[in-house]
Amino acid sequence: MAQVVLENVYKSFPGRKGERGVAPVTAEPLVAPGDEAPTINVDQSHQLPGTVNILRRINLTVNDGEFMVLVGPSGCGKSTLLRLIAGLEELTGGKIWVGDRLVNDLPPKERDIAMVFQNYALYPHLTVYDNIAFGLRRTKLENDPEDTPKQMPGWVENMAVGMTRSLPKRLRYLSEKEKAVDERVRHVAGLLQIESLLNRLPKQLSGGQKQRVALGRAIARNPQVFLMDEPLSNLDAKLRAETRSQIVKLQRQLGTTTIYVTHDQTEAMTMGDRIAVMNQGQIQQIASPLQLYNQPTNQFVAEFIGSPPMNFLPVQVKAPLLLHHSQFRLTLPEVWAPFLQKYDGRSITLGIRPEHLTISVPAPKNLLVQVDLVEALGNDTYLSVRLEDSSTLQVRIGPDRLIQLGDRVWLSIAVDKIHLFDSQTGMAIRSD
Ligand SMILES: Nc1ncnc2c1ncn2[C@@H]1O[C@H](COP(=O)(O)OP(=O)(O)O)[C@@H](O)[C@H]1O
Ligand SMILES: [Mg+2]
């Protein structure tokens, strides 16, 4: 087991027209590795022509045994970051530690990391058994029998293994190493409940079964770190939810440090001990699921985490505590006063989650809207409503409230649940 530390990691790919050069990483201030990665707006200033900065200033510490989820929209650089950690891509700048080893210059197989890919990457011509055993046969096991003196030369032994492989099990010749491999394969198959599939070929498996075999192959190697790149995205919704909790359970059981990549915020919220939210090659915030939800550091995180997403409305600040919108006026709790002073007279962004809007009565602090869409899910009902200026809001209400398309209703905003953002920078204005 080991912690994984990324310090000031950069990655750029060559641009299209073959201009050479890499991002001058030394021109950037070095940010100490640590939990609270600073939020930085996208800046292109340190980019040479001919290079594309895919990842910038990535600082992340994944603790020993932790389940860390990297989440962000498609194309933000998640896979690239995982591939850098695995050693499948070369770093442009920065340092990567696995445990106390700087692995920058180590080839993938020496990093003691196992990766599970989205497309499973199983060997099609090998059985499930051999797929799981494949990596084991090529790496050293603990107490590797190959280190002990042999009774027969390796090549004779290999021949004996090969010649007897297709015989019934009790007639098969197993080398000491093969016995250890066999034990491990069966143990892992037991963990994942795929014992009955060991003799099948990948093409004889369902998506969910393939996914478990891919997981089994990673687990069998007993690495220090698991890297998983959207391993559930090829499964249907029900299976995805089931497998999600199985993976979390397994990880707890094994205690192996895990970095799990997904674009799906629900997966991130339900699986991660902590979540690192990425956008455009940078980490926006690293925090526990509820911290992200309750205290997003900027508007991007606020919108990305939570479904349906947070609503945003432009409002004018009237210090100390008033917010003006063309349709309503809110008085904020006292705690906001010191933070709003410098925004007096300026426009800022009010953020409010769908569940913090409720149907209410006419009042100056409430807003009148027209219902454009009603989605009754059974346990909850989602409304899409339109303001006078044609902007829309998502509202989540209880299932018992009967609302019809076209209804005009008054909404009240839970004033102790609001979020405020600087409209220029997108950074949260915090009262805590
Ligand atoms: N080998 C490469 N050469 C050039 N650009 C690449 C290469 N690999 C990935 N990219 C680009 O890097 C960005 C991030 O890709 P990726 O890490 O796959 O994102 P994600 O996994 O978050 O969807 C994308 O814009 C992609 O086009
Ligand atoms: Mg990807």
Image (cartoon, grey):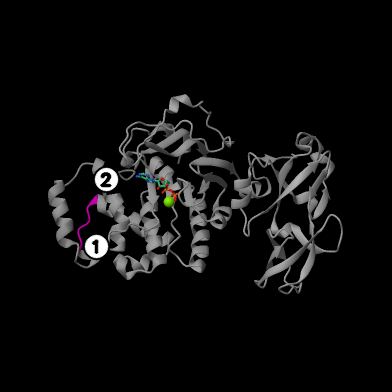
Disc 2 from disc 1: Cα separation: 28 Å
Residue at left offset 41%, top offset 44%: 80
Q: Position of residue 431 (x, y in %)?
A: 75, 40
Q: Position of residue 61 (x, y in %)?
A: 52, 37
Q: Amino acid at mark 2?
A: Pro
The residue mark sitting in front, 2 or 1, is 1
- Identify the secondary structure beneath mark 1: loop
First in sequence: mark 2 or mark 1? 1
- In the rendered image, which residue does mark 1 sit on? 125
- In the rendered image, which residue does mark 2 sit on? 145
Front position in the image: 370 or 255: 370
The answer to whether 111 is drawn above or below residue 414 in the figure is above
Check if residue 191 falls in the magenta segment: no
- Identify the secondary structure beneath mark 2: helix
Check if residue 175 falls in the magenta segment: yes
Question: Position of 17 compared to 303: left or right?
Answer: left
The answer to whether 214 is drawn above or below residue 52 in the figure is below
Residue at left offset 45%, top offset 47%: 78
Which residues make up the magenta segment? Answer: 172-176
Q: Quadrant of the N terminus?
A: top left
The answer to whether 394 is drawn above or below residue 143 in the figure is below
